[in-house]
Amino acid sequence: MTTEEQYDNNSIGNQLEVQRRKPSRPLGVTIVSAFIILLNLWFIIFTLIRRHDYLAGYGRPPFMSMSVSAILVDIFMYTIFVLIGFAFWRGKKLSWWLCVFYWFYELIVNTVFLIILFTSGEGAYTIARGVALSVIRITVLLLTILYFFENPSFVYFDLDTRLKLRYAVYLMIGAIITILLQNFLQA
């Protein structure tokens, strides 16, 4: 093999390596994944500290009585969210789907709450406070969803950028079905 052939083979190998390499993590992914991890670790610690007090009977309001199984379920769910945060950090597709689905779900719930608040006969202070909180939540959720539908996020999570609208429709339908199932099962 001549030197030129070796050079060509190396450059082809380098091109394949560059194509396989994961793109750099967008700043928003770093911030959101760190937030998910830290927040849920805090929830685990808070659950362990506060629930222990409630189980021991210290300062337990009657509506806050918690069983051991409820505490374990809380800790299990928070641990799942910590794992999702780490997967999000690493750019795993499933973590993108789970997070964006949750944000769509919360967006619908907060929008419905806002509509219910306007149609309720509550006092002006309660309505103003509820509207302000809901508008802030809805704004943050919309901005977060829009950010994660941008091309850098799609490329980082190895999603097809041509299917954004289809993904959004799937997530919206899934969130609506989840909310309807929740209400049906509670009735």
Image (cartoon, rainbow, N blue to C red):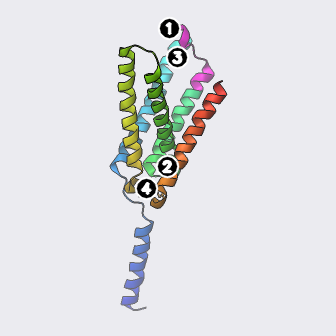
Q: Secondary structure at mark 1?
A: loop
Q: Earlier in the sequence, mark 3 or mark 1?
A: 3
Of the two numbered discs 1 and 2 in the rendering, the one whose residue sits closer to the viewer: 2
The residue under label 3 is which amino acid type? His
Q: Position of residue 133 (x, y in %)?
A: 37, 26
The residue that disc 2 covers is 168
Q: Quadrant of residue 186?
A: top right
Mark found first going from the N terminus, 2 or 3: 3
* Quarter-of-image position of residue 156: bottom left
Reading the image, the residue beneath label 3 is 52
Q: Tell me: residue 153, above or below residue 104.
A: below
Query: Where 25 falls versus 184 (above or below)?
Result: below
Q: Are marks 2 and 3 in contact (CB under 8 Å)?
A: no
Quadrant showing the C terminus: top right
**Image position of 23 (left or right of 73):** left
Q: Which mark is in front, 2 or 4?
A: 2
Q: Which residues are magenta?
A: 61-72
In which image quadrant can residue 5 be found? bottom left
